[in-house]
Image: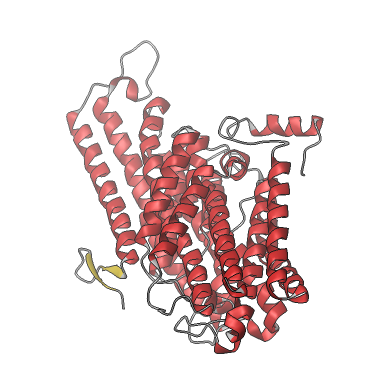
Amino acid sequence: MHNVGFALAGAWKVLLAGLVLGAGLPILFGLGIRALAWGTGGDAKLHAEGVTGPKARPIGTALGWLCFLVVVLGVVLGIAYIVATGFGKTISFAHVYPTIVAKH
Amino acid sequence: MTTNSVILALVIVTALGFDFTNGFHDTANAMATSIATKALRPKTAVLLSGILNLVGAFLSVQVALTVTNAVVKIQDSSGAPKASLLAHGGFALLLIVLAGLVGGIVWNLLTWLVGLPSSSSHALFGGLIGATIAGLGWAGVNWNGNGSKLDGVVGKVILPAIMSPVIAGVVAAVGTWLIYRVTIGIAQRFTDNGFRWGQIGSASLVSLAHGTNDAQKTMGVITLALIAAGEWHDTKTIPLWVKICCAVAIAAGTYFGGWRIIRTLGKGLVEIAPPQGMAAQSASAAVILASSQLGFALSTTHVATGSVIGAGVGRPAALVRWAVAGRMVAAWLITLPAAAVVGGIMWWIGHAIGGLAGAIVIFLILVVVAGSTFARSRRRPVDHSNVNQDWDEALRDAERVPAAVS
């Protein structure tokens, strides 16, 4: 049953990468939306009937877009990975920042 | 035209047909949730997904010639066909491949008719396994690999099929739960608009990844057939026209849209909201990409379904229709054996009749099955206009008017 061992060894890595990229980035996106709503104020946030919503805070808008920027970078990395794989390359994180290297 | 070039042509046409069914079977994996939440209009979604599949297929210049090696022993490790199968212009190998492809297509069409998202790779592998067992016996199948790496039917097909939906489901559930936590207190109109863009982005990523992964399989199979017939000699590259044909076939299939499956995955399984849709698609994209990086073969269908269920479980008080999920799991379990049985029977028919006539007969059987499946689907058509119809309401309709299939 060597295959079970190989599969489990791969599975936890996929789970980890999946949680970081597949859950982490959407949560960051959610935080971005929250920051944007905070920045926009008014009706973007739930508030009591008859009163005006919280006032706008520009810092929230900036934070929101910062979150989106990180998410977009993550997606660009994903696309770069797909393209690199197609050309027989892969993305290495050996230097912390991603570099495209030949697949071994 | 020799006998074998006619058979070769039949194999190529059948392989492209499989590629087409692969496309329309899997549109749902990328686009079902975006269509269900109305992030994209149905027609726009299939167009976008089709284009990205086309682009993805061209990006996959990696040689996928050894694709069948994971499950059957009809090639050696360099991708060249086994010498023992090459007598009479590769007839033995061509018949196995043809019968296997027919098995895969028939199963894809039947599951499409009943709207079940079964795995196209399982259908292809199942068909090939069945045809190989019929043609070469049990020993012709690579059941468990040689112990040096994840390989064989168990390692490349069965284990990933069990694990990948669970992994994707966990990722999507965690993502959904936390997204709902961080967006508490924000007006729904505001969040929905934001998550709409997140959904489109993540769904596009899944489409692109699908094009690179799945089109390769058919390219590999066609090139294998060409080599067996002596029409191509290079095991390092794939003829350009093969690449173009496969890319166009999978993109056309995707655009055609397996609306029945989109409906099941988008509306039937979970009543999905934009944040869930985004969590599900992101989980699918991340798990598919991470797996191919780590050499962990899997089916996009299993991942996408696991993600949608996960997104349903992760949202407090969401409705998951476990009966529908159960039907899907049942379909997954029988996909490989069922396609294998069809593949095996097709090989046996082709072999019993023998020669060119045998190949033509199994091709004609495929045409008849495909035609009658399509005719049957017209009785209760599902297309872009009614794909988002309320699920329970449709069920009541089905009770009043006996459904074509149930």
Query: What's the residue at 49%, 66% (across, down)?
Result: B217
Question: Is residue B345 visible in the rendered structure shown here?
Answer: yes
Depth check: give the residue in front, B326 or B59.
B59
Q: Could you tell whether B8 is left or right of B369 in the image?
A: left
Quadrant (top left/top right/bottom left/bottom right) for the N terminus of chain B: bottom right
Estimate the x, y position of residue B113 in percent, counting from the top left.
Answer: 68, 47
Query: What's the residue at 30%, 74% (across, down)?
Result: A103
Estimate the x, y position of residue B137 in percent, counting from the top left.
Answer: 70, 83
The count of marks equals 0
Query: What's the residue at 51%, 64% (across, down)?
Result: B218
Depth check: give the residue in front, B159 or B343.
B343
Above-or-below relation of B349 to A58: below
Above-or-below relation of B367 to B176: below
Q: Residue furthest front?
A: B1
Estimate the x, y position of residue B286 in percent, counting from the top left.
Answer: 40, 56
Depth check: give the residue in front, B41 or B233.
B233
Above-or-below relation of A78 to B50: below
